[in-house]
Image: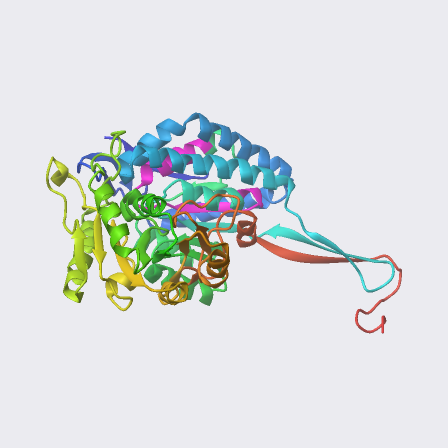
């Protein structure tokens, strides 16, 4: 049985706890490996290693740091298929999506390596003679990264790569469900000859390892992706310690379909957004706000296509919908479906755990569509994180905007229309961090900021240049070469 270990100060090691838990393939229930379960002491060792390594790393010129990231990028590209196979085996998403996720890490590595020569500051005129003024970015120190199971390598790349290129060290806790691809990613950092101590992998539970990372005085910032409940708790504890926190949490994303929309294109967007990754994306399409004049036509087209989706093991190239991550997620999804029925929504298809054709060996839920959903229903407001979509009737763009913005989340939204005027109105008024016109709610690219408003986050962003703001502080520098005391705001007036 393969054992997944920690990586601390450049060495692979198991926790002193001696405890391991199984890594389960969600498609068939088979045990793939065992992963070590760490303690606070393991976290402390990792933090001490990171602190020591960062003292030297911060002095390495950023273009030189970037050379390590270029090596990481080429190794990720070379091992794309292997990484995708590992990812699909332990997480469940279909292999096509697995390859796409690894490509996202490849893209991020190349992009962030480029930032080694683009960590721009500002030079500005001083208000006084013979004085120079500028600002520069400086690293914060040790970054504690807590990443989820649904995008186990992509999100890890969003966080670790900008942290490293800006001169920080990393202590990373991956999700317990997906430690195998995390270990493979760290092996690539190791093979790229990243100096020891800069990347540390500590496996374990959120209650033990996650809490230890958040509370550790040697960790200077926390970057977390996960649930609202956990994110709020992290923000409260870390904030009390005056640590920077970057939070990317939930979504309740909606596609707005106006009466002039291309319905065939809409169907493609809904299928991909609602049932890709079995709905286990923070950007998943969970609501469709459709104009009443085209509602029945859209439902008819959508039902015809949903019935064609093949479910099964994601390693099968013909499969379009894989399993959900574990049994508790399966039961949560089923509970929400029951709630929807009790609330009076009409079930158009799905609505149950899949058990036929051997699917009972894994965690499969049938693609589910509700109609006649009202905005005040729980299934229209709360994040289900499964292959469940709610159709809500609207009679204008203005009503759609109001319904879209009525939930506590603000991650992603989309509008389908042939009207450029209404497209721009939606772009202005939909309160989300991501917005798509004539495309679904998923498909973010790494060179733009990723994150949302309201309950989705706390104002920081992963990905793009904006992610550098998470891992750096601004330092303003003044050089006075006048040879005398000059007082800003006093001597120039």
Closer to us: 395 or 456: 395
- Residue 173 is inside the magenta segment: yes
The C terminus lies in quadrant: bottom right
The answer to which quarter of the image holds residue 255 is bottom left
The N terminus lies in quadrant: top left
Q: Is residue 10 visible?
A: no
Q: Is residue 336 left or right of residue 417?
A: left
How many numbered circles are shown?
Answer: 0
Provide residue 402's location: percent of width, then percent of height: 39, 67
Residue occupying the far left of the picture: 356
Q: Is residue 434 above or below residue 63?
A: below
Q: Is residue 121 left or right of residue 7?
A: right
Q: Residue at x 89, y 60 (%)?
A: 483
Provide residue 315's location: percent of width, then percent of height: 26, 31
Q: Is residue 359 above or below residue 438?
A: above
Residue occupying the far right of the picture: 483
- Residue 193 is inside the magenta segment: no
Residue extent of the magenta highlight:
164-188
Provide residue 412's location: percent of width, then percent of height: 41, 55
Q: Residue at x 82, y 74 (%)?
A: 490
Q: Is residue 484 above or below residue 55?
A: below
Provide residue 150's location: percent of width, then percent of height: 33, 45
């Amino acid at each position: 049985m393969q054992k997944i270990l920690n990586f601390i100060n450049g060495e692979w090691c198991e926790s002193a706890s001696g405890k391991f838990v199984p890594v389960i393939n969600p498609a068939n229930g088979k045990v793939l490996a065992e992963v070590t379960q760490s303690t606070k002491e393991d976290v402390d060792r990792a933090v001490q290693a990171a602190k020591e390594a960062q003292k030297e790393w911060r002095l390495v010129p950023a273009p030189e740091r970037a050379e390590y990231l270029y090596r990481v990028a080429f190794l990720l590209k070379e091992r794309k298929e292997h990484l995708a196979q590992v990812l699909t085996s332990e997480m469940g998403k279909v292999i096509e999506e697995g390859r796409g996720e690894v490509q996202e890490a490849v893209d991020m590595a190349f992009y962030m390596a480029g930032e080694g020569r683009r960590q721009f500051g500002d030079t500005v005129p001083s208000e006084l003679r013979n004085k120079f003024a500028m600002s520069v970015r400086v690293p914060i120190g040790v970054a504690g990264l807590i990443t989820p199971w649904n995008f186990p390598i992509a999100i890890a790349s969003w966080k670790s790569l900008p942290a490293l290129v800006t001169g920080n060290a990393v202590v990373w806790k991956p999700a317990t469900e997906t430690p195998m691809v995390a270990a493979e990613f760290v092996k690539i950092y190791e093979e790229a000859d990243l100096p020891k101590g800069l990347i540390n992998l500590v496996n374990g539970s959120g209650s033990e390892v996650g809490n230890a990372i958040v509370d550790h005085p040697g960790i200077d910032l926390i970057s977390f992706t996960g649930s609202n409940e956990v994110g709020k708790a992290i923000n409260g504890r870390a904030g009390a310690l005056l640590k920077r926190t970057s939070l990317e949490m939930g979504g309740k994303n909606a596609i707005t379909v106006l009466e002039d929309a291309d319905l065939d294109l809409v169907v493609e967007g809904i299928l991909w957004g609602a049932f890709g990754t079995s709905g286990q994306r923070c950007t998943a399409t969970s609501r469709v706000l459709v104009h009443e004049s085209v509602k029945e036509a859209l439902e008819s087209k959508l039902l015809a296509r949903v019935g064609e989706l093949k479910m099964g093991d994601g390693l099968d190239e013909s499969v379009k919908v894989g399993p959900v991550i574990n049994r508790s997620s399966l039961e949560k999804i089923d509970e929400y479906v029951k709630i929807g029925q009790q609330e009076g929504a009409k079930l158009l298809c799905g609505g149950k755990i899949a058990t036929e054709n051997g699917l009972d060996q894994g965690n499969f839920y049938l693609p589910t569509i509700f109609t006649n959903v009202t905005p005040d229903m729980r299934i229209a407001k709360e994040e289900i994180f499964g292959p469940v979509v709610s159709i809500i009737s609207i009679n204008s763009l203005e009503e759609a905007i109001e319904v879209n913005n009525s939930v506590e989340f603000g991650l992603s939204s989309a509008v389908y229309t042939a009207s450029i005027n209404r497209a721009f109105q939606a772009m202005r008024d939909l309160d989300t961090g991501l917005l798509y016109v004539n495309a679904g709610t998923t498909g973010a690219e790494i060179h733009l900021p990723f994150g949302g408003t309201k309950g989705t986050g706390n104002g920081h962003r992963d990905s793009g240049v904006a992610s550098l703001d998470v891992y750096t502080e601004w330092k303003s520098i003044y050089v006075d070469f006048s040879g005398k005391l000059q007082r800003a705001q006093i001597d120039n007036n």
